[in-house]
């Protein structure tokens, strides 16, 4: 029984002097109110459609290589793309960099 619940009971008794809801009833009202509010927030959060992960999106995220990006385990190489700044790979050891950033 929180302070707000007590205040709500006092407010209800003041507004509805004829009705005398039990503490349990008020608690239930409050629980439903809190749950309703939470549900509304959840609906707003989950209302946005989850973005489909397309190969292009994966590419934009860059690879997560810890190696030289030589094999198709590198998502950049797998998609016939060069590694870019977004990649987590080490640009010094990466062998899949764009030609212009290759160290001659
Ligand atoms: Zn890579
Ligand atoms: Zn990459």
Image (spheres, rainbow, N blue to C red):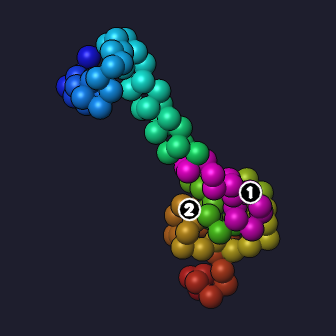
Can residue 90 be found in the magenta stretch? no
- Mark 1 surroundings: few (<14), some (14-19) or many (≥20) residues within 10 A: few
Q: From this view, report whether residue 88 is shown above or below residue 102.
A: above
**Residue 69 appears at what percent x and percent y?**
66, 61
The answer to whether residue 8 is seen in the rendering is no
- Residue sitting at 63 percent across and 52 percent down? 47
Residue assigned mark 1: 52
Is label 2 or label 1 in front?
Answer: 1
Q: What element does badge 1 sit on?
A: loop
Residue 55 lies, with reference to residue 99, above or below; the image says above
Residue name at image x 74 percent, y 57 percent: 52
The quadrant of the image that shows the C terminus is bottom right
State the image quarter where residue 30 is shown: top left
Q: Alpha-carbon neighbours of circle 2 within 10 Å: few (<14), some, or many (≥20)?
A: many
Is residue 29 depicted above or below 76 in this figure? above
Q: Secondary structure at mark 2?
A: loop
Tell me the quarter of the image containing the N terminus: top left
| Magenta segment boundaries in residue numbering | 44-58
Mark earlier in primary sequence (2, 1):
1
- Whether residue 102 is visible here, answered yes or no, is yes
Q: Look at mark 2 in the image and give the residue it sits on.
A: 89
Magenta run includes residue 46: yes
């Amino acid at each position: 029984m929180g302070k707000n619940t007590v205040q709500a009971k006092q407010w209800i008794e003041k507004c509805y002097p004829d009705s005398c809801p039990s503490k349990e009833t008020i608690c239930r009202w409050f629980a439903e109110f809190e749950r309703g509010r939470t549900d509304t927030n959840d609906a707003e959060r989950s209302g946005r459609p989850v973005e489909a992960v397309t190969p292009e999106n994966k590419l934009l995220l860059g690879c997560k290589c810890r190696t030289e990006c030589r094999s198709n385990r590198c998502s950049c190489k797998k998609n016939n793309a060069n590694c870019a700044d977004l990649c987590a790979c080490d640009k010094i050891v990466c062998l899949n960099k764009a030609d212009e950033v290759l160290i001659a």
